[in-house]
């Protein structure tokens, strides 16, 4: 795996995490119509599409059985953003769970 491909994976997973933060902000909308007109939904959606495009590019160069486990890096970003930006509590169980997922992803890619 080249550095460029790894960088695309890291950027794509980061973008997926950021998109989810916008979706979280959009979730405060009251009603379906308000949700559809919520700017956070649309910003998150555009970022998520960008993430998907990067994923498709990566799939040109790596097997799906390698790419999909590597997207579990998103769990790391999500935990960090949840804690630092959304001020959510992160338990030891969550840290252990994400760590095990990442270890599994690394083992699969070897």
Image (tube, helix red, strand yellow):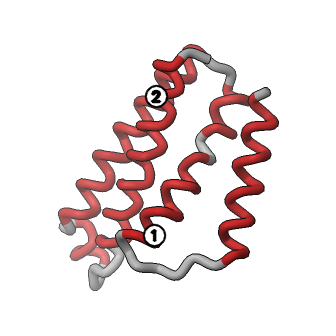
* Residue 27 in the image: above or below residue 1: below
What residue lies at 27% left-to-right and 79% top-to-bottom? 29
Q: Residue most toward the bottom?
A: 30
Q: In the shown orientation, is residue 13 left or right of residue 62?
A: left
Identity of the residue drawn at 79% across and 45% down: 104
State the residue position of label 2.
7
Q: CA distance from mark 1 to mark 2?
A: 22 Å
> At x 47% / y 79%, what residue is drawn?
88
- Which of the two labelled residues, at mark 1 and mark 2, occupies the earlier sequence position? 2
Which quadrant would the N terminus be assigned to in this image?
A: top right
In the picture, measured across the screen, residue 47 lies left or right of residue 58, that is: left
Label 2 CA crowd tier, 10 Å (few <14, some 14–19, many 20+): few
List x then y, in percent, for residue 31: 29, 82
As helix, strand or loop, the secondary structure at mark 2 comes to: helix
Q: Which mark is residue 69?
A: none
x then y, percent, for residue 98: 68, 60
Identity of the residue drawn at 31% across and 81% down: 28
Q: Vertically, is 1 above or below 78? A: above
Within 10 Å of disc 1 (Cα), the crowding (few <14, some 14-19, many 20+) is: some
What is the number of the mark on residue 82? Answer: 1
Q: Quadrant of the C terminus?
A: top right
Between 63 and 85, the one nearer to me in the picture: 85
Q: Secondary structure at mark 1?
A: helix
């Amino acid at each position: 795996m080249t550095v460029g491909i790894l960088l695309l994976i890291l950027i794509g997973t980061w973008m997926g995490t950021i998109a989810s933060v916008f979706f979280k902000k959009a979730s405060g909308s009251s009603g379906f119509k308000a949700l559809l007109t919520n700017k956070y939904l649309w910003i998150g959606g555009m970022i998520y599409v960008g993430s998907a495009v990067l994923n498709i590019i990566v799939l040109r160069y790596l097997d799906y059985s390698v790419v999909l486990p590597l997207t579990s890096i998103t769990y790391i970003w999500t935990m960090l953003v949840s804690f630092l930006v959304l001020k959510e509590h992160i338990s030891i169980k969550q840290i252990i769970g994400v760590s095990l997922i990442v270890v599994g992803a690394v083992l699969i890619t070897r």
